[in-house]
Amino acid sequence: MTDPIAARQELTDHPHYRYRGCAPDPDNPRMAAGDPDVSVDAWAPYTGDGAEPQRDRIAREKAAVRVCGYCPVQALCRTYASTEVVEAGSGGAPDVVRLAEPEGVWGGQIALERHRALIARRAGTAVVSEQALAEAQSPQKLAVLRALAVELYETRVAHRAGMDVRRTNWHRSALCSLLGLNKETASRDDLLVAAVRHGLLPGTHRIVWDGLWPIAAAPNTDGSRQRRIAPGFPLDLLTPRPRQRRTPTPSVQVPAGRGPATRPGDRRLPHFTPAPAAPALPLPATVLEPAA
């Protein structure tokens, strides 16, 4: 289990911590440095009188999460906020497990998402043996994890890992089994979070998270691969292919005489239709002579 104090110290000691998106703007301390239109209070819990309107809360959290997407310490911030703190129960009561930051937006996650992840971890925490961790630390599997942390598509993951797609998918499937995840239901985020929790990925490693529509962590038994995504994924959000650069059309030169246009360097003779030649023999006249 990660120590919350050590995780907090690692976050604040990072050289890019001063450039975090939620830091106060030097010119306007009430606004965020990542976006001058977002208040620094967007990351903190609501402290006004009464209940915050749902529409205002959703807009505030959405703006904060958007700024977190460009933060250089997003992974460290999320790791610290999701760290579990165990408080001893009093009077024979069982120990209480809570989050290091139970409120506010941290690392691009709202409080509800962090609590749901905590409940899922406490409900189905798998015990990973030392032999499984040793096997998961092979050079090939670590290369796949590092590539999976920054790429979303299986072909790019395979290219960055230095192996073909089939072997990359096999290693991803094996990592899910070694870390106690169900490869039928585990998402890419679940695999990366488990890798960070077990020390396979450093906390300082830059991780590109899935977002609202998680990508499958590994191929499942029905043949689908990493492109399998959660239901409801809008097709218009798929990453478009890079636009090909158009080649400029060469200039066309028109000769002075009759004939079609030719391109520079074209050695073919221009095509033209010759005038009809006079017949060799006189043709019979078809006009009748006037009657006498």
Image (tube, rainbow, N blue to C red):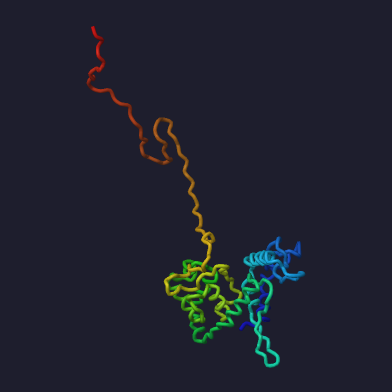
Residue 103, given in percent of the width and then of the height, sits at 69, 74
Residue drawn at point x = 58 percent, y = 71 percent:
207
Q: Which residue is farthest right?
A: 49
Task: Classify residue 193 as left or right of residue 30.
Answer: left
272 vs 38, nearest the viewer: 38
**Number of marks present in the image shown:** 0
Q: Which residue is farthest bottom?
A: 92
Residue 10, given in percent of the width and then of the height, sits at 66, 77
Q: Is residue 61 above or below residue 257?
A: below
25 vs 52, nearest the viewer: 52
Residue 56, given in percent of the width and then of the height, sits at 69, 64
Task: Classify residue 129 as left or right of residue 101.
Answer: left
> Can you say which quadrant of the picture contains the N terminus?
bottom right
> Can you say which quadrant of the picture contains the C terminus?
top left
Q: Which residue is farthest top?
A: 292
38 vs 197, nearest the viewer: 38
> Looking at the rendering, which quadrant does residue 123 occupy?
bottom right
Residue drawn at point x = 47 percent, y = 43 percent:
250
Q: Is residue 114 above or below residue 56?
A: below
94 vs 160, nearest the viewer: 94
Task: Classify residue 142 as left or right of residue 21.
Answer: left
> Looking at the rendering, which quadrant does residue 30 occupy?
bottom right
Residue 112, given in percent of the width and then of the height, sits at 64, 73
